[in-house]
Image (cartoon, rainbow, N blue to C red):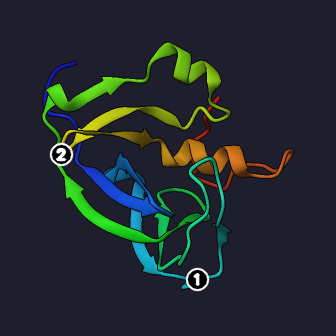
Amino acid sequence: MTGAPPPLLIFQVGPSRFAADAADVERIDPARAGPRDLVEASCLGAPSAARCELVVRGAASALAVDLVLGIREPAPDDLRALPELAAACLASSAVRGLVLLDGTPTPVIDLPTLVCELRPAGSAPEPGEPHHA
């Protein structure tokens, strides 16, 4: 890998902290701010308060989260591949790796993949939405 890793948006769902490529988030809205599909429960869990929505770039979906904790620019040495055993045990391919935040391993989530996996079977992608095979 060359160059600096992309900035990561850090957010919380329930008691757990997650990271996602900040470029995958079109905007952050207050909870229930728009007429769109809202993912309230996923492999990340369910938010306890659902104070915010992460509107996923190119999708008509948003992910309900409890808190947005900020943006971090991780050092390349802080990024880790997902261990093979963990990847094999997970029900979702949206968990792409780990980032060390303050010494704690934090899952890095591919938000477009997450909302695509949660789309009802047989429904087509939204126009302009990335297709993940």
70 to 75, vertically: above or below:
below
Callout 2: helix, strand or loop?
Answer: loop
Residue at image position (56%, 51%) is 44
Does residue 50 appear left or right of residue 120 in this picture? left
Residue 52, position in %: x, y?
Answer: 46, 76
Residue at image position (67%, 55%) is 126
Residues marked 1 and 2 touching at CB (< 8 Å): no
The amino acid on which the numbered mark 1 sits, given as a three-letter code, is Gly
Q: Quadrant of residue 34?
A: bottom right
User: How far apart in space, not on screen, are marks 1 and 2 (Cα)?
Assistant: 34 Å
Q: Quadrant of residue 87?
A: top right
The crowding category of the residue bearing disc 2, from other C-alpha atoms within 10 Å (few below 14, some 14 to 19, many at least 20), is few
Residue 36, position in %: x, y?
Answer: 65, 73
Does residue 20 appear left or right of residue 46 in this picture? left
36 to 118, vertically: above or below:
below
Residue 114, position in %: x, y?
Answer: 59, 46
Callout 1: helix, strand or loop?
Answer: loop
Does residue 122 appear left or right of residue 69 in this picture? right
Does residue 30 appear left or right of residue 77 in this picture? right
Q: Name, please, the residue furthest toward the right.
A: 122
78 to 116, vertically: above or below:
above
Q: Quarter of the image for the N terminus: give it.
A: top left
Q: Quarter of the image for the C terminus: give it.
A: top right
Depth check: 66 or 74 in front?
66
Q: Which residue is mark 2?
A: 102
Q: Which residue is mark 1?
A: 34
Residue at image position (77%, 49%) is 124
The amino acid on which the numbered mark 2 sits, given as a three-letter code, is Asp
